[in-house]
Every structure is written in structure tokens, then in C-alpha cells.
Amino acid sequence: FHAVAAGGEAYRLDFSGTNPGRLRLHLVDYSAHPAALAEDQSDPSGRITVKLLHTSPNRLKVYSGGVFTQDLNVAPDGTPYSALPGFEGRDELTPDVGYACGANAFDLSSRELTVTLCHGRRLEIRAMPAIQLSLG
């Protein structure tokens, strides 16, 4: 479906049923000539943040322009920030329009994925298959 969004704002997208396994988001700027949209990602008015509620246990991977984008929940050495000493809370991990295109973070307590979407660049969110074991 198509929706209208103002640049520089934050939005929330909820699904009434099961979340899609692959979700593609694309922010189109009709006010500018297509050639001008190519790589000017410096203007925050050409970006929005979207929060998505995910209740399934699947790991989510975000691809910006076809390239995997590491989430902000993981330190460069691969350690989850929540396991690091001095971690104060989730506000530090919530991307906004000032972050790079494709920046994303998952809040485990609220089960929300927040992503930064830029005009002219496609974003794809893929749910990775999960296996649940029960012993007993």
C-alpha cells in the first residue's frame, strides 16, 4: 500500500495479523527531480523513522539499498550493548532522522524495531527463520 509521510518525522506501523517475512519500504520524494534524489542523504527532511511492532521470535535483518545494515544493539566486537558495563537504557539505541540511512535497533522489552528510512533508497526487513525447542 502507499502512504503519505512528512519528512523529518517519526511514524509507527502496526499490522493487525502476522508480520510479513519480507517487508520493503521506500520513501519517494515527488517534489524533486529523480536525478536529484540519487545520493543526497545529508538533509534530515528527506528521512523518516518508522517503528514496527514484531511479536514473533524471529531475528530481523535490515538491508538498505540491498546491503545488510548491522543493528545498533550490537557493539563493533559483537557484544550486545545490554551486556556491557554502564549500559543505562534503550534510549541510546533508538535511531532518529539524524542517523544514517538504514540505521536500526530492536527494543526487546517493547518488541519494536525502529529504522531510519531515506528518500530514494529502498529498505528491506527480513525475518530470519527461528527454531523453538521444548524439552520434556
Image (cartoon, grey):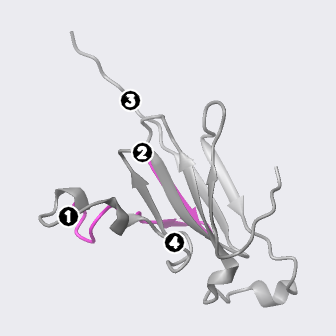
- Circle 3 sits on which residue? 131
Point out residue 94 in the picture as x, y percentages from the top left corner.
43, 65
User: Which residue is at 60% across, 41% downward?
Assistant: 21
Q: Secondary structure at mark 1?
A: loop
Label 3 with label 1: CB-CB less than 8 Å: no
Q: Which residues are magenta?
A: 60-79
Instruction: Tell me the chief SS of the magenta region.
Output: loop
Q: Secondary structure at mark 4?
A: loop
User: Which residue is at 87% across, 77% downward?
Assistant: 30
- Circle 2 sits on which residue? 110
Earlier along the polypeptide chain: callout 4 or callout 2?
4
Earlier along the polypeptide chain: callout 3 or callout 1?
1
* Label 2: how many Cα within 10 Å (few below 14, some 14–19, many 20+): few
Q: Secondary structure at mark 2?
A: loop
Amino acid type, residue under disc 2 in the picture: Ser
User: Which residue is at 42% across, 35% downward?
Assistant: 57
CA gap between label 4 and label 3 equals 32 Å
- Circle 1 sits on which residue? 87
CA gap between label 4 and label 2 equals 17 Å
Residue 90 appears anywhere in the view: yes
